[in-house]
Image (spheres, rainbow, N blue to C red):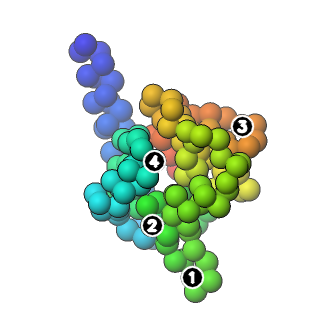
Amino acid sequence: MAAAAHTTTSSSMHIEILLARCEADRNRHMAGGGASEDELRSVEDALRRPLPEPFRLFLQRLGGGVFYLKHEIFGPRRVMIHDIELVPDLLSFRTWLGAAVPPGLLPIHRADGKIHALDLDAGRGLVRPLGAAGRTYPDFTRFLEDVVLG
């Protein structure tokens, strides 16, 4: 039992370090600002399941947008970047992709022609490429570290 508590604490500390790094690099992002609790609950209600905690925390602190001028991360609301560009919201992007999204997957990221999705049916929220071969990440924290901050 103590080991599980230590792992959770360690994981929580790790996401906090990564979020602090993203926040320190704010000038390299075009984001819409943190999501409210109501916005997050609305997404979870539509999905009929909770978002994995590290992803939820990311959205709460930073929201959706373009990070490091390359990585689109979808949040609970769309984000206008320029007059003609926007980053869609999570649910609209999922709907737009339609049948390309198997049940239980939630597209959260797009960059370099690849889309990554959270596997909401996997306990900790695996992140996997959508529709193409590629690396799977054990959770959003590892994905954030390896792909977005990499």
Q: From the top left corner, tell me how far across and down residue 144 is, in percent.
A: 50, 46
- Mark carried by residue 47: 4
- Of the pair 79 and 49, the residue shown nearer to us: 49
Q: Is residue 120 above or below residue 79?
A: above
Q: Earlier in the sequence, mark 4 or mark 1?
A: 4
Q: Find disc 3 in the rendering and name its residue.
A: 134
- Circles 4 and 2: CB atoms closer than 8 Å: no
Q: Find disc 2 in the rendering and name its residue.
A: 77
Question: For the point 26% across and 22% down, which residue is it?
Answer: 5
Q: Find disc 1 in the rendering and name its residue.
A: 82
- Of the pair 98 and 56, the residue shown nearer to us: 98
Question: For the point 52% across and 58% down, which residue is it?
Answer: 91
Classify 10 Å Cα crowding around label 4: few (below 14), some (14-19), many (20 and above): some
Res 105 → quadrant: top right
Spatial distance from mark 2 to mark 3, Cα to Cα?
28 Å
Q: Circle 3 — which element?
A: loop
- Of the pair 118 and 111, the residue shown nearer to us: 118
- Circles 2 and 1: CB atoms closer than 8 Å: no
Spatial distance from mark 1 to mark 3, Cα to Cα?
31 Å
Q: From the top left corner, tell me how far across and down residue 136 is, in percent.
A: 62, 33
The three-letter code of the residue at mark 1 reads His
Residue furthest to the bottom: 83
Q: Earlier in the sequence, mark 3 or mark 4?
A: 4
Q: From the top left corner, tell me how far across and down residue 13 is, in percent.
A: 31, 38
Classify 10 Å Cα crowding around label 1: few (below 14), some (14-19), many (20 and above): few
Q: Circle 4 — which element?
A: helix
The three-letter code of the residue at mark 2 reads Arg
- Circles 2 and 3: CB atoms closer than 8 Å: no
Side (left or right) of 12 relative to 113: left
